[in-house]
Amino acid sequence: MSKAPPARQRKMLSHSIDPRRRPHPAQSQSGRPSPSKTELPTIKLDAISIAFASLFVVGLIGLGLGIWLIYALPRQGKATVRQSPDSTSSLRAVYAEQTREAQNAEISRLREELGSARQELATVANARSVAAIMPAQPANATILDRPPLALILDAPVYKQAHSLSCESSAAAMAANYFGVGIGEEAILAALPRHDNPHHGFRGNVDGPYGGTTDYGVYAEPMRQVLVRWGLRADHLTGGIDEIRAHVRQGKVVIVWITYNLQVQSPRQVTTSDGQVVTVVPYEHAVLITGYNRNGLWVNDPFSGTQTFYPDPDFARSFAYLGNMALVIGPPAGP
């Protein structure tokens, strides 16, 4: 009877014959794969896969073109516009047309101003031609051109010494303009006193201004005083147009109006001689020395300044006292 192998030997033998430890057919006995029997992986492509791949590539190309169109073309277009001679020429043509229209408008405006200036020059020439055939005037008579076109006589401007001595102050301006050296006080002293202003000075010359009891004097007594000193003094028979005609002849005009052309209501009073007389609150007298197309220049004795009266306002105030005025001319010759 044979002996059993040792335990270690038995273990080794059992391992060598274990069916679970069989070598793989593709392996050699050494445990390495055999080169002759190695298999490569294969890729199978069908029509659907190729179509998807093509679409993906086309999408990438389209995306690239879109980016190029968004960023590259606008810049190229701006550069083209800036560099395009046709666009530059068109802009220059537009600017030139606008400039031409502005120049034509300015030329039209200048032509209108030139026409107005020619009319004014013709008026001045006419006034000077009239002055050339007028009677001899004192050396201090001047013709001034002021905008708007004006014919103004260089009469002195006095400020009245009493609250109600405007008529005497205006008469003193007229007399001294023609070289007759009399003052306000001398004229005032020569006037008679009467409650009828057509006959003499009504009321107190230092009375309150604007009333009808202490009042003033009208044209008739004033004319008598000025004629006594050798001046020519005539009642005005017309309106504003006649005043302008007398100023063109080198004469000055004393007019009766309301102070500062105020709107007033004429009143009727009965005087001591039984006459009904029109009186107007704030009655005033000024000396007209010039005119222009819109109104009259006056020397105002109340303020002692030269003032301009627009025609419509002057005509209204002038009518309150029946267009009362005295046209004063130089002393009559020998």
Image (cartoon, rainbow, N blue to C red):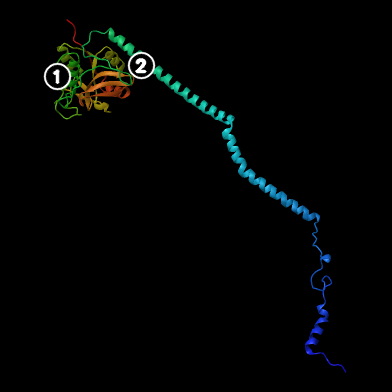
* Residue under label 2: 120
- Give the residue displayed 70% in from the left and 50% down from the top: 59
Judge whether 291 appears above or below 94 on screen: above
Q: Residues within 10 Å of mark 1 (few under 14, many from 20)?
A: some
Is residue 125 something one can see in this rendering? yes
Q: Where is residue 172 shown, x and y percent of the image?
A: 17, 18
Q: Residue 245 vs residue 25: left or right?
A: left
- Give the residue displayed 75% in from the left and 53% down from the top: 53
Q: Where is residue 282 shown, x and y percent of the image?
A: 22, 27
Q: Where is residue 220 shown, x and y percent of the image?
A: 19, 16
Q: Give the secondary structure at mark 2.
A: helix
In the rendered structure, which amino acid carries the disc numbered 1?
Gly
- Give the residue displayed 29% in from the left and 23% down from the top: 309
Looking at the rendered image, the disc whose residue lies closer to the viewer, 2 or 1, is: 2
Is residue 274 something one can see in this rendering? no
Tag count: 2
Between 124 and 59, the one lying in front of the other is: 59
Judge whether 325 appears above or below 260 on screen: above
| C-alpha span from label 2 to label 1 | 37 Å
* Residue under label 1: 183
Q: Determine the residue located farthest toward the bottom in the rendered image.
A: 1
Image quadrant in which you'd find residue 9: bottom right
Quarter of the image with the N terminus in it: bottom right
Between 253 and 264, the one lying in front of the other is: 253
Q: Where is residue 131 shown, x and y percent of the image?
A: 28, 10
Q: Give the secondary structure at mark 1.
A: loop
Q: Earlier in the sequence, mark 2 or mark 1?
A: 2
Q: Residue 87 vs residue 10: left or right?
A: left
Q: Residue 103 vs residue 191: left or right?
A: right
In the rendered structure, which amino acid carries the disc numbered 2?
Glu
Which disc, if any, is residue 293?
none
